[in-house]
Image (cartoon, coloured by chain):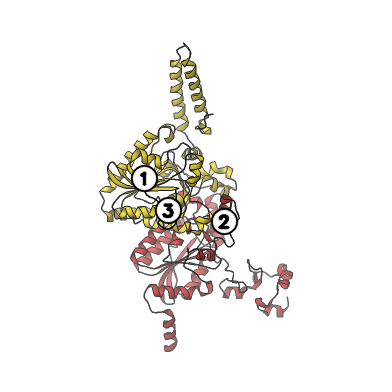
Amino acid sequence: MSWFEKLMPSRIRTDAEERSRNRSVPEGLWTKCGACNAVLYRPEVERSQEVCPKCDHHMRIPARSRLENLLDRGSAQEIGGQIKPVDVLRFRDSKKYKDRLSQAQKATGEDDALISMRGRLRGMPVVACAFEFEFMGGSMGSVVGERFVRAADLALEERMPFICFSASGGARMQEALFSLLQMAKTSAALGRLREAGVPYVSVMTDPTMGGVSASLSMLGDINVAEPGALIGFAGPRVIEQTVRETLPEGFQRAEFLLEHGVIDVIIDRREMRDRLSRILAMLCGEPSPEIKRLEQVDTA
Amino acid sequence: MNPNFLEFERPIAELEAKIEELRYVGDDNDLNISEEIQRLRAKSVSLTEQIFGNLSAWQIAQLARHPQRPYTLDYLEEIFTEFEELHGDRSFADDPAIVGGMARLEGRPVMVIGHQKGRDTREKVRRNFGMPRPEGYRKALRLMQMAERFRMPVLTFIDTPGAYPGVGAEERGQSEAIARNLEQMARLRTPIVCTVVGEGGSGGALAIGVGDRVMMLGYSTYSVISPEGCASILWKSADRAQDAAEAMGITARRLKELGLIDAVVAEPLGGAHRDPAAMAASLKAHILEQLGELDGDDVETLLANRYQRLMAVGNFKE
């Protein structure tokens, strides 16, 4: 690849060029959009928070990147990180649960599938958590439930708004009924926030399914989704097998849910931080963060 | 083989068939064979005790789904009086997969809500095999909130393969309906006693399963996913359902050991369907006992205890 091509922004390049170049893409510097197949310049994709600059496809991102993107730089403090999984049932399918856990831990660098933090969102103290989808499909077991509840409790205690980004296939089968009951546990904790009038915003990202969708994800004062996210209770394949017909176009995508009145709003990831801070400031009766920003500019 | 017997009951079925045959012979014969029949009956009982004393999780799953198993409306008939069924979610439809309404329990007004399966094909289809749609859960919530207003305890009967996986159910917010019930049941200001009477299928079961007491009948099951579903995902083959049932520990006995339920209600020999009246009587006694315990608590204590029970569920280290 010539130096000139390297400099060229991704949106100028044509598909034909990309196809011929696919196999010679050097590792790390270039990436491919899973939706439109465009070859993208890695640093540019990172700048746009893993949203394809060509087609706006929202790629899946790690839990920590989510929280970094959301919270003010240097403000984040992890909570509940010391809570770690144990295999009480000694569950074993084609592999031992213990081995699956250590494999996932090695692959992601996380102990389990939910990361919680307290921090500031454009100055406002908040508690936020995010699911790590790469950790066993973001499945909810005891650790996810407990970390979520501790985060919600902190939000309640200090009356800070609570935000959760979900990305999960549902309950974790390897913890059997313990997992199912985390649905009730997390929902009960959110009930207390609701009673106390502490705002909870749920952001559903791709994918949010099963027991996670049918508990903490759908209980937001405001239910937000990222564009194109797959969101639902039963998986599309299960539904197809049950009803024996092909599913409608765009079924269970964020836009479909918006149309059917299930979610409040779809927000582009690149605007997420600003929009959430504005929404939360209104719910908390605080001055607009936009005005605060202007004041800061004035005084500077 | 008599279709009311399950595969693992084959030896019992064969013995029962023999007894029937002898009785037939005895009727038009001078030979006194009643002694022989009695001997075989005793043998049948001990054989049943032996087989049922050592059931696998998968065999219990078969019993929980037995076509003759008593359903919510059967218990309503036996345990309660003056049942007044109430229909609809007030916004979309009435879901026949969940029944609910007011009734009297030993004279006391209560709200009863339960999944309902059908007995014959037509009824099965009408009841959607006990798989509720969002309107079913919303009807249940409406009735629970009404119970709260009029200070009636809520009694739920759980028996579903799971919430219905259909296009319409998704369009109308199946997830939201289930989630809302969990959140609301956790803080409903009236006692709630839940009993799994058949299949406790995942979120579809839990959506009417949050309460102050959770009981299970001896041969009922309760799990995060069906054994078949778990097997096809984790073993890549639905044929491994037996292994999945064992691994997940879906039986009443196992879940009691794990501290996830409060009580196991023993079933009559051979299962609830062999003696529905005895089953109902025993279940009624258990419900009265649990309600009696809860009656002593004021609402705030009740809610605090319910919340603590939910928060205590989970295994982790720190």
Q: Residue at x 28, y 41 (%)?
A: B106
Farthest residue in the top direction?
B30
Q: Residue at x 51, y 57 (%)?
A: B170
Q: Which chain can be seen in yellow?
A: B
Mark 1 or mark 3: which is in front? Answer: 3
Q: Which residue is disc 1 drawn over?
A: B262
Sequence-first tag of 1 and 3: 3
Q: In the picture shown, does residue A299 fall above or below A268?
A: below
From the viewer's side, name the closer residue of B200 and B177.
Answer: B177
- Disc assigned to residue B153: none
Q: CA distance from mark 1 to mark 3?
A: 24 Å
Q: Which residue is disc 3 drawn over?
A: B137
Q: In the picture shown, does residue A95 fall above or below B62?
A: below
Q: Residue at x 55, y 43 (%)?
A: B241
Question: The residue under label 1 is which amino acid type?
Answer: Asp
Chain designation of label 3: B
Chain designation of label 2: A
- Is A177 left or right of B155, judged from the image as shown? right
Q: CA distance from mark 3 to mark 2?
A: 21 Å
Please, what secondary structure does the residue beneath circle 2 have?
helix
Q: Position of residue B317 (x, y in %)?
A: 43, 55
